[in-house]
Image (cartoon, helix red, strand yellow):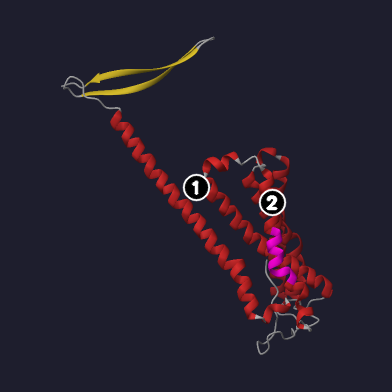
Amino acid sequence: PARALPKGDGNSCCPCSDGAPFPEYTMVILAILMITLVVVVVVGNALVILAFVVDKSLRNQCNYFFLNLAISDFLVGAFCIPVYMPYILTGRWMLGRGLCKLWLVMDYLLCTASVFNIVLISYDRFLSVTRAVRYRAQQGVTRLAVVKMLAVWVLAFLLYGPAIIFWELMVGESIVPEDECFAEFYCTWYFLLSASTFEFFSPFISVAFFNFSIYLNIQRRNRSRLAHVEAEKEDGWRVIDGQNSSVFFVKTRKVNRKISTQAYSAMEIRAIS
């Protein structure tokens, strides 16, 4: 989600806005694009949520994390973008300070939760490749998946939520003008640097590590599989009576009403000298 930034000429950290920032034709184009974005985001993620609810076969541990991501993105399209539209188009916040606080908390929460969900999905894929047997055994255990989902939301809220709500009380004053809406800590560089490290840089490194590890593991498996296939091919050839003879094995199955047996028969093909 797009986060509100203070408007002005740049001479002050948090100056007042100076009216509508766009010409009328630009506002119309932006409004159409944003409405289209809202429809696509809401409908797309609603279908994902509906599929998870209707189809019980989708309720495994991995898909719970995709459900969590769909919920956060759905709320972005259903709440954050519609509330942001009048503000970005007119250049003025006209919905009151209370709704401003709520919108900021939801905006930062949902954005951070989406990032953390992507990290969680990458970690889940990492486990499915590197610890396949244990991972498959835990697919039916949904309690652990629910705990991880809740942890994502709690961590996402703790990163920005308390600062948005209580920053004004801690510093003793507000730097946000009445007709604007942005976080009080927008001008505090050390807080932004620390929060950005946890929200963007650490997740980026984590996702890169998990996906690179998955790539290396798959490459190692492919090399091992090719070596095994080559070894089986070599074991399937024989030399009989000093002549060039090829021996290969054919797997046959004999089935009747009562007994199903399986036998392996060897066929010898002598090369024409």
Q: Secondary structure at mark 2?
A: helix
Residue stretch in magenta: 153-162
Circle number at residue 147:
2
Circle number at residue 113:
none
* Residue type beneath disc 2: Val
State how far apart marks 2 and 1 are (Cα).
22 Å
* Residue type beneath disc 1: Thr
User: 10 Å neighbourhood of mark 2: few (<14), some, or many (≥20)?
Assistant: few
User: Residue 124: where, in percent of width, then height?
Assistant: 58, 50
Residue farthest along the bottom direction in this orientation = 11
Q: Name the residue rendered at 40%, 44% in the picture.
A: 222
Quarter of the image for the C terminus: give it: top left
| Residue at which label 1 appears | 130
User: Residue 238: where, in percent of width, then height?
Assistant: 24, 25
Quarter of the image for the N terminus: give it: bottom right
Can the viewer see residue 145 in this picture?
A: yes
Vertical relation: 268 (above or below) 8: above
Q: Quadrant of residue 224?
A: top left
Q: Quadrant of residue 106?
A: bottom right
